[in-house]
Amino acid sequence: MGTPEMTFDLTLSADAMINGRRQRIYSPMMLFEVVQGYAIEAPAEPVPIEPKGKAVISGVFRRDPEFKSVVKLKATNLPLEVECSEVTLEGDASRYELSCTAGQNVEPGDYPIELAATSYLAGRDTQQTPYNIPPVEAALTVKGAAMASDK
C-alpha cells in the first residue's frame, strides 16, 4: 500500500540440499508490476464557467478489475466563489461528472485545480485502510462578466 506505480524484475532464491551439498538455486526472472487500484483522467481542455453560471467537469474513470471499493471524487483548489459537487463511483462506473456553480463575484482567469480521489482497502477483519492516489491536475477558465448587464 502506498507504493507508486512501477515495474521491476524479481528473482527468487532458495537454499536446498542437492546430492548432500547445500546449494542456492534461483528462479527465472519475473516481471513484477505494481498498479493503482483506479485512475482518474482529467478533461483535456480547461472547463469554462461564467460568473453566476454552471459547468460540469467530466472525464474517464478506470478501475482495476480486482479493486472493488467505492471511490469518492471531488475538485479541490477551486477559485473563490466556485463550488463543485462530490461524486461517488461504484461498481462498473467508467465516467464521472462534477457539477459546479460560480458566484457573481468570481474573478475571471485561468485556474489550475485538482481532482482528488479517496477510497479504502478492505483489510483483515473488515478493517478499512485509506487508499488514495495522487490528485489529478485539471483547469477551470472563468470567463469575464457581461459588461452590458453592469451598465
Image (tube, rainbow, N blue to C red):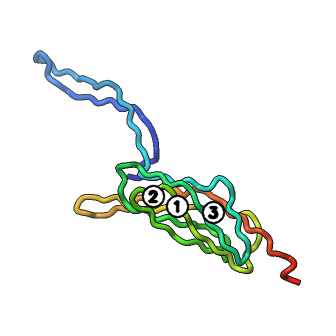
> In the image, 6: left or right of 146?
left
The disc labelled 3 sits on which kind of residue? Answer: Ile
Separation (CA) of disc 2 from disc 3: 23 Å
- Residue 27's quadrant in the figure? top left
**Residue tagged by mark 1?**
96
The disc labelled 2 sits on which kind of residue? Answer: Ala
**Residue tagged by mark 2?**
93
Can the viewer see residue 80 in this picture?
no
Q: Does label 2 or label 3 sit earlier along the sequence?
A: 2
Q: Residue furthest bottom?
A: 151
> In the image, 13: left or right of 149?
left
Can the viewer see residue 124 in this picture?
yes
Residue at image point 43% right, 52% down = 63
Relative to the observer, which residue lies in front, 54 or 107? 54
Dot 3: what SS?
strand
> In the image, 149: left or right of 86?
right
